[in-house]
Image (spheres, grey):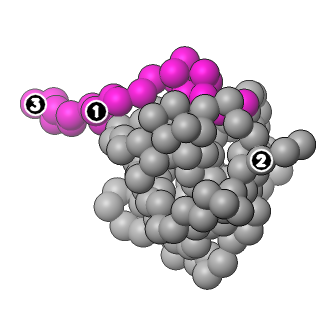
């Protein structure tokens, strides 16, 4: 008997994500949005495969997703939260301004599905700064978490 596993729901497919985020291969690290509340929060996934371009060097004998790329993927999900027309952020520049309290709890390896939740904690529109909390999971267990600062604005 074959086990049946439900697919992740889809709120936003890759082409919709590409309309919002400026990132492209090899740096677009979000495959699908599975939960979305504009300007508030988003949950997205990154399918981690042995074909990802970082695995040959990190590490040849033990393919582990680099922590900095997990953080970058989470920041991209934060960008999806903030760069939406519904919150007046579409097509604006959006920069990763800082990270605090980041912890890596478990390694993420080829074959894992990284599920990332980013939640807006505070928005200072006057200064163009957003503070977000992020957690990333594999199989329901936290693998990475931290606080993110995002900045909108000029070149």
The quadrant in which the N terminus is found is: top left
Query: Does 106 sit above or below residue 69?
Result: below
- Helix, strand or loop for the magenta stretch, by majority: loop
First reached walking from the N terminus: tag 1 or tag 2: 1
Looking at the image, residue 2 sits to the left or right of residue 28; the answer is left
The residue where tag 1 is placed is: 9
Does the CB distance between marks 1 and 2 fall below 8 Å? no
Identify the residue at horizontal 55%, vertical 62% (top origin). Answer: 123
Residue 127: x, y in percent?
71, 62
Looking at the image, can residue 134 be seen? no
Q: Could you give the CA–CA distance between mark 1 and mark 3, rounded to whole angstroms?
A: 24 Å
Relative depth, front residue between 16 and 121: 121
- Label 1 environment density (alpha carbons within 10 Å; few <14, some 14–19, many ≥20): few
Tag shown at residue 33: none
Of callouts 3 and 2, which one flags the residue occurring earlier in the amino acid sequence?
3
Q: Nearer the viewer, mark 1 or mark 2?
A: 2
- Disc 3 to disc 2: CB gap under 8 Å: no
Q: Return the x and y of residue 26 as percentages of the image width and height.
A: 76, 33
Q: Which residues are magenta?
A: 1-22
Residue drawn at point x = 73 percent, y = 68 percent: 98
- Element type at marker 2? loop
Can the viewer see residue 105? Answer: yes
Q: Position of residue 42 (x, y in %)?
A: 42, 47
Residue at label 3? 1
Instruction: Check if residue 2 falls in the magenta segment.
Output: yes
Q: Is residue 125 left or right of residue 155?
A: left
The residue located at (61%, 81%) in the rendering is: 101
- Name the residue beneath numbered marker 2: 153
């Amino acid at each position: 008997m074959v086990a049946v596993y439900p697919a992740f729901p889809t709120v936003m497919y890759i082409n919709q994500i590409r309309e919002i985020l400026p990132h492209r291969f090899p740096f677009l690290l979000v495959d699908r949005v599975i939960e979305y509340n504009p300007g508030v929060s988003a949950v997205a996934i990154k399918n981690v495969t042995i074909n990802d371009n970082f695995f040959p060097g990190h590490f040849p004998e033990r393919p582990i997703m680099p922590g900095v790329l997990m953080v970058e993927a989470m920041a991209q999900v934060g960008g999806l939260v903030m760069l939406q027309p519904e919150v007046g952020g579409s097509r604006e520049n959006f920069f990763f301004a800082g990270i605090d309290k980041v912890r890596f709890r478990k390694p993420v390896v080829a074959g894992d599905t990284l599920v990332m939740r980013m939640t807006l904690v505070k928005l200072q529109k006057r200064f163009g700064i957003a503070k977000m909390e992020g957690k990333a999971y594999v199989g329901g267990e936290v693998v990475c978490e931290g606080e993110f600062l995002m900045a909108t604005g000029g070149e």
